Image (spheres, rainbow, N blue to C red):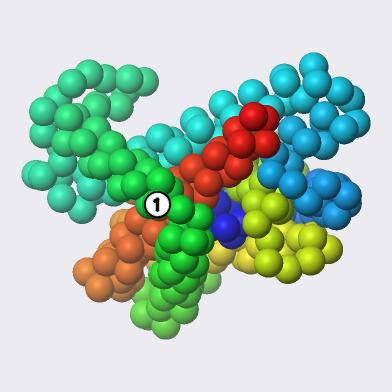
Amino acid sequence: LSLGCIIGFGCFVLPGDFLGTAGPLGATLGVLLGGAAMLIIARSYGVMVRAFPVAGAEFAYAYHACGRYHAYVCGWFLALGYLSIVPLNATALAMLGKFVAPQLFARGYLYTVAGFEVFAGEILLAGAAIVVVGVFQIRGATGVGNLQVALTALLVGGVLVIGLGTPLSGAASVANLQPAFAPDRSALSGVLAMLAIAPWLYVGFDTLPQAAEEFDFSPRQGLKLMVLSIGAGAIMYAVVILATASVMPWRELVADEPVWATGTSVRVSLGPIGLACLALAVTMAVFTGINGFFMASSRLLFGMG
């Protein structure tokens, strides 16, 4: 649940932006330092999970510590955050569909937002994903849990293929990672720029406390699981960033402004099979995010009720 929510579409869609912000080494350091910062917050969650192993997590903590008014504000803002991530993840499917099969999904132009064209085919694809996961949610927690395990296993497998296949393909080179930091800013400012957005990359480990009432293990294990998921997430982010930057000179890649930088690199290094594995990983990341945040939202609203 926790790792599947941490690794969303951003892990595969945003490396091109990360490289432009901080360069390969700067982006990697920023992501790793962000993960280390999240461990401090996870420690606090670990204490609270042991004290209040109930559905609602932050809402329950705020209620016991500060009363109903603080809990009301905390709970509804958290619900808004969780529920907004569900369609946000689904939009990544639209991006994937446009990249893999533009003739199928880039149909029925609707409007343009912030320079991005939106098509009816993309909306239907994203909407269908939300509906499918919603059906699983209605059927019960057991099916949701089993689905999350299967999807996350495929997600991790996809990242392993990219992480191991890219350096073994012969297309990757350490020379392509130069310069290690973005040349238009200092190394420190690049790392700090990544560190500033890193907390959003790890949103999702806090879904685990939401399910504390359903744990079939001691709540004391909650902290260990959150730490492991944050650590695994940090490694997966770093692997995808470095794989994206190593196939061709990363400055040329960023300057070309490809629709999908990671997809472009994997297509060059691993060909259609590698691109299919990447597409599978992105799809699993999207569905684990939708599935996990759907479940966390339901537990939160149940706790508030």
Residue bearing mark 1: 139
Q: Is residue 298 left or right of residue 255?
A: right
Vertical relation: 7 (above or below) 183: below
Q: Quadrant of residue 3?
A: bottom right
At horizontal 22% and vertical 18% (from top left) the residue drawn is 111
Q: Residue at x 11, y 34 (%)?
A: 107
The quadrant holding residue 129 is top left
Q: Position of residue 32 (x, y in %)?
A: 70, 57
Task: Specify whether residue 32 is in view.
Answer: no
Residue at x 71%, y 53% (from the top left corner)? 212
Residue 180 in percent (x, y) is at: 61, 57
Label 1 packing within 10 angstroms: few (<14), some (14-19), many (20+): few
Residue 181 appears left or right of 172: right
Picture coordinates of residue 209, whole percent (x, y): 71, 50
Visible residue check, residue 292 = yes
Quarter that holds the C terminus: top right
